[in-house]
Image (cartoon, rainbow, N blue to C red):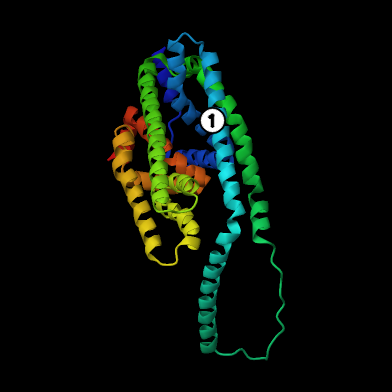
């Protein structure tokens, strides 16, 4: 029987052109089926994060299906309460938005006046066109907010549709974990199942370590930002700390994104450059501390990826899937590395990703 499997396995050797075509097909599938794949990946990550709770409930003689249902229900209720609290704070900020709109308009007007002076100077240097003046046809532009909403309504619908499927997928993954695991093992020849089992175990450890570690680092960043903004007497310290701390989790680009909420709030309170410099320095310090100390200590022991591999993965998955790609880039790349480490002919790729 193994000889027959070997014959089937090597009956159709692949050529470089076939591999390129296969890679292009996979890439196209990932692009066009992005909503489906992203929904599955988010559900898988949440399942790895919540599975220890279901196992703990099983130890207390609670059936796995009931435990999975209770875990998903409590998670949804907790998420709903957090969203409700956040909506209240955002609504309070929205009521005070006119106070912050005036400094923004003043800053925008100052920038616009400088651009107009530059444009006027350039027009004086440029030679006048021949043929006299021509009437200028003014075209009214649509409202930018309305245009943005119309452009993004498809993305919002896809995200909402995917979010409705995540709880069901999460429940089925948690409740039928053993059956899914057994069915997955049956897909491989009996001679390879031991290696496949070790690979899946390592993938489980990596993904669980990443999700738990990232959640812990996120909580630390949010609390630290909240306390700093509260001590600095910034308005809406919790809301600003929450948004800034979560932005700070994004590698590389996150530190710039984390500056924006406190600086936007500070436009009305601060009238010198010094407070903004202090905010930028402190938030950058939080980012560097999280990226170079907390993440390596909590996640880095399991997720062994070098800086180049992380950067390339962020560029690729961010280009392919946008913002959600930036969040999923590291776990996807870490999973690929684990698979490469357990397949002999792919081990050089695994060593490159972790070297």
Task: Locate the N terminus and report the quarter of the image it occupies.
Answer: top left
How many numbered callouts? 1
Q: Is residue 129 above or below residue 291?
A: below
Could you say which is closer to the camera, residue 40 or residue 221? 221
Please provide percent x and percent y for residue 352.
30, 40
Q: Quadrant of residue 84?
A: top right
Q: Is residue 117 above or below residue 259?
A: below
Identify the secondary structure beneath mark 1.
helix
Task: Locate the C terminus and report the quarter of the image it occupies.
Answer: top left
Please provide percent x and percent y for residue 220.
38, 39
Residue 336 can be seen, yes or no: no
Mark 1 neighbour class, 10 Å CA radius: few under 14, some 14 to 19, many 20 or more: few
Q: Is residue 343 above or below residue 306?
A: above
Please provide percent x and percent y for residue 88.
59, 43
Name the residue rendered at 70%, 85% in the picture. Answer: 134
Please provide percent x and percent y for residue 157.
65, 41
Could you say which is closer to the camera, residue 106 or residue 323? 106
Name the residue rendered at 56%, 45% in the picture. Answer: 89
Name the residue rendered at 64%, 55% in the picture. Answer: 148
Q: Is residue 296 left or right of residue 238?
A: left
Please name the residue that numbered disc 1 is placed on: 78
Q: Is residue 292 left or right of residue 176?
A: left
Q: Residue furthest left?
A: 355
Q: Residue furthest top?
A: 61
Residue 342 can be seen, yes or no: yes
Q: Is residue 200 above or below residue 333?
A: above
Q: Is residue 295 left or right of residue 21?
A: left
């Amino acid at each position: 029987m193994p000889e027959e499997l070997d014959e089937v396995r090597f009956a159709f050797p692949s050529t470089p052109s076939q591999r390129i075509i296969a890679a292009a097909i996979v890439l196209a599938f990932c692009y066009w089926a992005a909503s489906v794949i992203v929904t599955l990946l988010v559900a898988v990550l949440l399942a790895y994060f919540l599975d220890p709770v279901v196992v703990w409930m099983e130890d207390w003689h609670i059936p796995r299906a009931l435990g999975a249902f209770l875990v998903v229900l409590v998670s949804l209720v907790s998420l709903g309460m957090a969203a409700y609290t956040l909506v209240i704070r955002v609504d309070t900020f929205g009521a005070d938005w006119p106070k912050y709109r005036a400094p923004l308009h003043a800053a925008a007007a100052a920038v616009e006046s400088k651009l107009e002076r530059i444009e006027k100077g350039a027009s004086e240097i440029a030679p006048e066109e021949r043929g006299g003046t021509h009437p200028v046809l003014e075209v009214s532009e649509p409202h930018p907010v309305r245009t943005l909403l119309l452009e993004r309504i498809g993305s919002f619908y896809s995200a909402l549709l995917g979010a409705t499927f995540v709880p069901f997928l999460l429940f089925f993954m948690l409740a039928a974990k053993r059956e899914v695991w057994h069915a997955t093992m049956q897909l491989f020849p009996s001679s390879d199942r031991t290696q496949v089992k070790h690979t899946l175990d390592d993938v489980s450890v990596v993904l669980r370590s990443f999700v738990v570690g990232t959640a812990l680092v996120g909580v630390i960043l949010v609390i630290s930002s909240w306390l700093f903004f509260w001590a600095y007497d910034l308005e809406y310290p919790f809301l600003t700390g929450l948004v800034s701390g979560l932005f700070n989790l994004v590698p590389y680009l996150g530190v710039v994104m984390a500056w924006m909420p406190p600086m936007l709030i500070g436009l009305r309170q601060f009238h010198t450059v010094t407070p903004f410099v202090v905010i930028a320095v402190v938030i950058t310090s939080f980012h560097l501390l999280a990226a170079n100390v907390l993440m390596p200590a909590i996640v880095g022991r399991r997720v062994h990826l070098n800086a180049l591999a992380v950067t390339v993965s962020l560029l690729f998955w961010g280009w392919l899937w946008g913002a959600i790609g930036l969040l999923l880039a590291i776990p996807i790349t870490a999973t690929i590395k684990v698979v490469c480490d357990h397949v002999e002919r792919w081990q050089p790729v695994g060593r490159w990703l972790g070297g």
